[in-house]
Image (spheres, grey):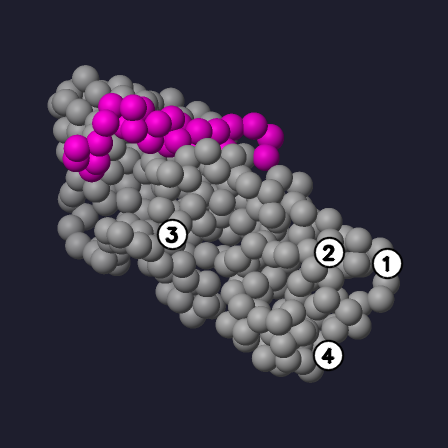
Amino acid sequence: MIQIQAGSGPTALRILLGSQLRKLRESKGISRDEAGRCIRASESKISRMELGRVGFKERDVADLLVLYGVEDDETRDVVMNLVDQANEPGWWHRFNDLLPSWFQAYVGLEEAAERIRTYEVQFVPGLLQTKEYARAVITAGAVGAAPEEIARRVDLRLERQRILDGGNAPTFWAVIDEAALRRPIGGGEVMRGQVQHLIDLMNQPNITIQVIPFSYGGHAAEGGAFSILRFSDQDLPDVVYVEQLASALYLDKREEVDRYTEVMERLCAVSTTPAETVDLLRQIMTEL
């Protein structure tokens, strides 16, 4: 029986549904090519469906359940209800004109995550940014954008931050390079407000912030920023997200995730403790 965790967003539900369909197919020894012919589609479409990278048509799923020999009414009802939920647009749908497709997937996964660990080099992580800091970052990166577009991009970033509040908030663990905290984004006043915001956020039990100080020198993550997301649904693998200039990598193979997890553990080991983080943030504020 498929178990659906409360609060799972449509992106996670698509991945969960795809995973269940793959298990049903494999249990019957049916190839992706055979499954594709059943729904008048290609093997590659079955692959995309099983990875949760496309929407699901009710008729396709119903036909696949017949092919896979799923006759129990209760199981069929659970699967078909999951199709409806997975096809519902996420809250970010109204921002689709601003979000590239490769980032829409991340916003959906971020919403569904139980734990998010992130390493950032250049900026304060988006989920921890103040409105003023976010506006400065977005303005610098969106050359020529109209003020209305800048405002909507800021609204989107602040909307994302709502996941950190409430009873179902994920654990959020950030490791930030000291350079990001000393780069004067938006000027001294904006930076002082941002650093104070980080100090305030440290009071939330689900948020941990560490800083890699300049004094440490080189470290294990010289390659750049990344995030590791974990989900409460056991059928959803951990995902490593690595953003690039005009695209992103989503890594979920065990060996890839393990490699990034090891790097994150090393970063945490050489970074400030939470208490030391607050002391360093206060020191930075006096120097801004």
What amino acid type is highlighted by mark number 1? Answer: Asp
The part of the image, by quadrant, that contains residue 168 is top right
Q: CA distance from mark 2 to mark 4?
A: 17 Å
- Looking at the image, the residue that sits furthest to the top is 189
Give left or right: position of 281 versus 117.
Answer: left
Image coordinates for residue 61, horizontal then vertical, percent = 69, 62
Label 4 belongs to which residue?
28
Quadrant in which the C terminus appears = top left
Amino acid type at mark 2 = Val
Asked if the magenta segment contains residue 148, the reply would be yes
Q: Secondary structure at mark 1?
A: helix
Q: Decide which of tag 2 and tag 1 comes sooner along the chain.
A: 1
Left or right of residue 251, residue 288 in this image: left
Can the viewer see residue 90 in this picture? yes
In the image, the segment drawn in magenta is 140-168
Q: CA distance from mark 1 to mark 3?
A: 36 Å
Q: Amino acid at mark 3?
A: Trp
Secondary structure of residue under mark 3: helix
Q: CA distance from mark 2 to mark 3?
A: 27 Å
**Neighbourhood count class around disc 3 (C-alpha, 10 Å): few under 14, some 14–19, many 20 upward:** some
Q: Name the residue located 73 percent from the left edge and 49 percent from the top edge.
A: 81
What element does badge 2 sit on? helix
- Reading the image, the residue beneath label 1 is 73
**Is the residue under label 3 in contact with that under label 1 (CB below 8 Å)?**
no
Mark-to-mark CA distance, 2 and 1? 10 Å
Q: Residue at x 41, y 62 (%)?
A: 251
Q: Which residue is mark 2?
A: 79
- 129 or 196, which is in the foreground? 129
